[in-house]
Each structure stands twice: as C-alpha cells, then as structure tokens.
Image (spheres, rainbow, N blue to C red):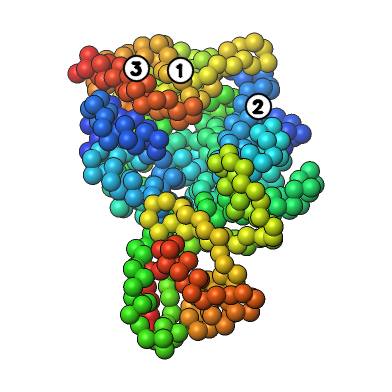
Amino acid sequence: MTYATQSNIPSLVGVGYKTQHIDDINTNSGTVKWLEIHAENYMADGGPLIKQLRHLRENFPISCHGVGLSIGGELPLDQDHLNRLKKLIDWLQPGLFSEHLAWSTHEGGFLNDLLPLPYNSSTVTRVADHIDQVQNTLGRQMLLENPSTYVAFKSTTMDEIDFLSDIVSRTGCGLLLDVNNVFVSGTNQDYSPEDYIDRFPVEHIGELHLGGHAEDMDDHGETLLIDSHDNPVVDPVWKLFDRLLARSGPKPTLVEWDNDIPDWQILESEASRATDALGRAA
Amino acid sequence: MSLSDFAPALLNVENPVPDGLVDPKGRPAGRRFDVYRNNVVHSLSEALASAYPVIQKLVGEDFFKSMANVFVRQFPPSSPLMFQFANEFPTFLETFPPVRHLPYLPDVARLERARRQCYSAADADPIDGTVLTGATPEQLMSARLSLHPSLRVVVSIYPIFTIWENNNNDIQKPLPTGGQDILISRPLDTVNMQTLPKGGADFLRALYENKTLAEATDIGSETDGFDLTSNISGLLAAQILIKTTM
C-alpha cells in the first residue's frame, strides 16, 4: 500500500532541535522555519522533554527523524519499538517522518550507530519489506535517507541510486537526500558526488539534510571522511547543494549539528546560508 | 557476508575485520572498519558519561573512559531508548575489581540512575496537602495515598547524598557519619532530592504498595526513631501526593 505525501514542512530551512537552544528558539529572528527531532528521545513515559515538545509544536512545524528502527538490518523490525514510534507519531503528527538506510540492532542489542549494508537483490527486498511494515503501521509515507559509509561490501551488486530507486518503486516511500552524506560517501567510495547529484531521482525528494564532517585517513593514506555532525557545512557541500537545487528546486532543508553543539548564532548563520541558496533556486 | 559477523566484531577488537568488507579498490577494509568500532564505543561511552556524571567526577575522566570501554562491551544497550541505557552500571561497579576500594560508588550510581529515571517518568499533578488536614484521625489512618510516578527512593549505608552534592556542585560539605536514604521526585519539571528521616524509605514503600497510612506507619515504626509527623511533612514538601482514597 502506498501513502500520499502530506507535509506541513515548508521548502525552507529548519534545524535539528537541541534542548540547550530552547530559549534562542523561542526568540529566534525568523530564519529557522521548522525543527527536526530525533524520535527516540521522546519515547519516555513523560517528563519535561515531552512537555517542551508539546509546546514547540504549537509554534513550529516539526519533522521527526528516527535513528533506531534498523531498517537495513537482517533481523525483523522490533515491533515494540515500532509501536512506540506509532504512539509518538500519532500525537506529534509531524510534517515528515524519516529513517536511515542503515542498521543498528543485532542479536546482542542496539549499537547506537548507523551501520552499512550491502546493496543487492536480497537486501533490496528486505529493506522494502521493512519499509512496507513501517508505513503500514504508521499509516503514512516515510522518507528514506542515503547513508554516509566508510567500507564497501564485496556482496554489493547495485549502486546506491539504483537501490534507492528500486525501494521507492516497491514501497512508494520518499527520499531524504543528505548532501553531506553524498560528499562523504563519494569521497570514501571513490565515486563522483556531482554525478550522484545529477542522477538522483529528485522527484522523490521530501527533505534535504546538510551537516558537517571530519577528515581522517585510511591504511593507504587515502582521505576518509567521517560523518561527525560537529562542524560547519564545508564549501564543496554547499556547491553540491546549489547543484542539486538547480535540478530539484527548493525543498525542506535541515541543518544538522549533533555533536560539539555550537551557540545558536552559529547554527542560525548556517541556516541563513541555506536560506539564500534556496532563494536562488526558487 | 552476513551482518551477524559485523556486529560482534564492532565490540570485540580481537575479532578480525569481517571478510567481505573492502575499500573501493577491493583491498581489505582495515582502518575503515575501525571508524565503526570507534563510533560505537565512543558514542556509548559518551552516553554512559552523560548518564553518570558524578561517577565520572569521582573516578576522573581517564579512568571513567577505560571503565566505560569495558562496560559498554559487556552491556551494550538492549533497545534504541538510550535514556534506559546502562541501568546495569551500578551492579557492574559492585563487581569491577579496580573500584573495589570505593565501596560507596555503586550506591552513588544508583542515585544517578534514579534521578535519570525520575526525569523521564510519567507525569501527574500533585495535589494540595490540605486534604489531609481536613480529615479526622480515623479517616486519615485508613487512607491510602497515591504517590507521584516519578518517585524513587535510594537507601544506602554511605552518605551518598552529600557525596553527590559535593561532586555535582564542586563544594566541600563535611560528610555525615552513617548512611543516607534519599527521596527523588519530579512533581513539576525539576528533579528534587531530599534525605529521608528514619524509617522513611520503608514507610514510602508501604504507601507505594497501596497500604493504608496505619499499616505504613506500623512498617515505618519497625525502625527506631520513626516519626510519622516528620515523614508526612517530608512527603508534602516533596509534592509527591497525587491522590488520597479515604
């Protein structure tokens, strides 16, 4: 079963919500038009965080980003977790819901990281089945996000765009394109981020992500980029963003900054730069 | 390869990098796999430190990090709800040989765990204590009191409240002799703590188990020096009364 896109998130700029910014958000100058929360942080029985979110949703469109469903995993989805997610989505009614093309849970438990999977005919079926299950449980469309990856699999037989396109046609889900992830994975996997952007099925994009990364090196002295979300967006990623927008037109765009969280003003200036780029593409 | 080779190799550095993982030129993944290893252990260690900041302060950051390296491999999270991660940490501290000379550590960790559970517990509106003052003594003693769902009690033979306060606030209050029992609650948005009078922990537990005030008083009185009035006023000061059934 497919679900229609139904979003109150404007094709403008939002930021990842961090509790330390609550006062700034309440008095923000208007650059930031919407907020994204991580679903798993709001699955407690109660408490001030949930109360704060109930208040925030009165003033901002909210997008919900899951980090724990393990959609790319070999295990069946955790039905308890899916039920908790449904409970949250039912009251929050977020404009968008997204999750990752990655896995995080195995027999031993939850690993708190977004881990990679090979792209081939058996994984594409499994991921599509998981997405069907998520969309049928939630009764709405979800967006699937392209990952940052550091290793390749010998068992991969499809490229990432073909994989994502196949998933979209099987499930009717939308896509969340993380532009930084394109740059990180392209560098790490030795493909051209520009070609990726030029081939991406932009008609299925429901949301864009921008974020910062860190730089490391592999055993052979090759650059290895790490998706750290602890830095400003770098110039090559801004360029890719412009390149994408020229094809796709403006889309809801999120600036993510999850570690070494900066002062609100710094986040706001990143948001402002993204707003300018969206304006040029309108 | 199966992802079930991938997961154990993340937490066990002695496991080889799984076969079938390569770089873009087809060479073995090597250090590239270590990025995932580092991410997993680093993110879990950070989560442990943010759940147990006073333990980190007590043992120092470097020691805490080494200890976290051991803990997160033994007790990775059982679910994606990270606010429930590391509930095993107090028990782990009881059995971790390098901290055996710090016997109060597990109870301080229990206090930190209780604070965290209290923070995300269900909400309820506290009621005004005057409902108790209007009742006859007979009504009062047969009443059952419903307590706030955020309520937690930690008992210890060590002065863990003062240890927590000193380290959390960078102060040097003299440590009292003997143990401290602590009531932790979040009637509104803030987690509050207060030390309990003698027998107070047993008294609260009895109320929590839906015993009458008379029965709870009997249970509290098994401890020498139990005083009903100071226990009731402590309960009202903590604003943890949400319903009375008389």
Residue positioned 37% across, 21% down in the render: A266
Q: Label 1, label 2: how many angstroms apart (C-alpha)?
A: 20 Å
Residue positioned 22% across, 27% down in the render: A30
Circles 2 and 3 on the same chain:
no
The residue sitting at the bottom extreme is B138
Residue positioned 69% across, 32% down in the render: B62
Q: Position of residue A140 (x, y in %)?
A: 30, 47
Residue position marked by numbered label 2 in the rendering: B34
Residue positioned 30% across, 33% down in the render: A25
Does dot 3 land on a helix, a strand or a loop?
helix
The residue sitting at the front extreme is B174
Please state the chain letter of the residue tagged with numbered disc 2 in the rendered image.
Answer: B
Identify which residue, A118 or B88, lies in the foreground: B88
Q: Position of residue A46 (x, y in %)?
A: 40, 55
Relative to A106, does residue A178 appear above or below in the rendering? above
Q: Which amino acid does label 3 sit on?
A: Phe
Residue position marked by numbered label 3 in the rendering: A241
Q: In this view, does A80 lie to the left or right of B199?
A: left
Please state the chain letter of the residue tagged with numbered disc 3 in the rendered image.
Answer: A
Q: Label 3, label 1: how many angstroms apart (C-alpha)?
A: 10 Å
Relative to A183, does residue B18 appear above or below in the rendering? below
The part of the image, by quadrant, that contains residue A251 is top left
Does dot 2 land on a helix, a strand or a loop?
helix
Circles 1 and 2 on the same chain:
no
Residue position marked by numbered label 1 in the rendering: A183
Q: What residue type is labelled 2?
A: Asp
Pointers 3 and 1 in contact (CB under 8 A)? no
* Disc 3 packing (10 Å; few <14; some 14–19; many ≥20): many
Please state the chain letter of the residue tagged with numbered disc 1 in the rendered image.
Answer: A
